[in-house]
Image (cartoon, helix red, strand yellow):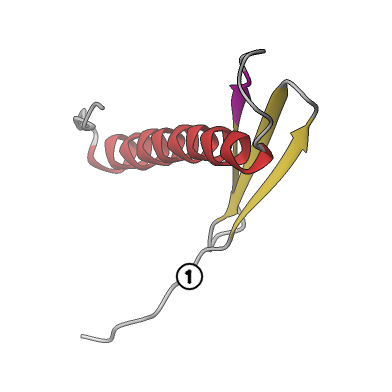
Amino acid sequence: MTQATVGWHIELEFEEDTQRTRAAALVRLGDGTEVRAHGYASRHPSDTEQPRVGEEIAGARALNELAMKLLTKAHDEIDEASGRASYPLTP
């Protein structure tokens, strides 16, 4: 059996203002398919400004959404190929 090494590159971009952070995640799969997701974080007015924390929260939320979309995509492909319903893990 021959093994192949496959890699994905995930891009995260952030837009920030003093109260909110928005993260956009993008992964390009080996077949050229792109999957996109978004995450958001809001700073409470009494919290100190910590842009990195907002990026971490918004980024984690975007990556979580990305993971769920990839699981759904994989299960849809399994269902199509097998003709039966697969059962994705739920968070």
Q: Magenta span: helix, strand or loop, mainly?
A: strand
> Looking at this view, is 9 or 13 the one in front?
13
Helix, strand, or loop for circle 1?
loop
Q: Looking at the image, which residue is at 19% across and 30% down?
A: 87
Q: Quadrant of residue 39?
A: top right
- Residue 69: in magenta span: no
Q: Looking at the image, which residue is at 62% across and 47% down?
A: 26
User: Which percent across, then down, holds residue 48?
Assistant: 65, 27
Q: Is residue 42 left or right of residue 4?
A: right
> Looking at this view, is 31 or 62 the one in front?
62
User: Which percent across, then down, holds residue 67?
Assistant: 41, 40
Q: Residue furthest bottom?
A: 2
Q: Which residue is mark 1?
A: 7
Residue 30 vs 45, above or below: the answer is: below
Q: Looking at the image, which residue is at 63% across and 20% down?
A: 43
User: Which percent across, then down, holds residue 85?
Assistant: 21, 28
User: Which percent across, then down, holds residue 91?
Assistant: 26, 27
Q: How many marks?
A: 1
Residue count near mark 1 (Cα–Cα under 10 Å), binned few <14, some 14–19, many ≥20? few
Q: Looking at the image, which residue is at 61% across and 21% down?
A: 47
Q: Quadrant of residue 13?
A: top right
* Magenta stretch bounds: 39-43
> Looking at this view, is 57 or 45 the one in front?
45
Q: Is residue 87 left or right of residue 60?
A: left
Q: Quadrant of residue 52?
A: top right
Q: Residue furthest top?
A: 45
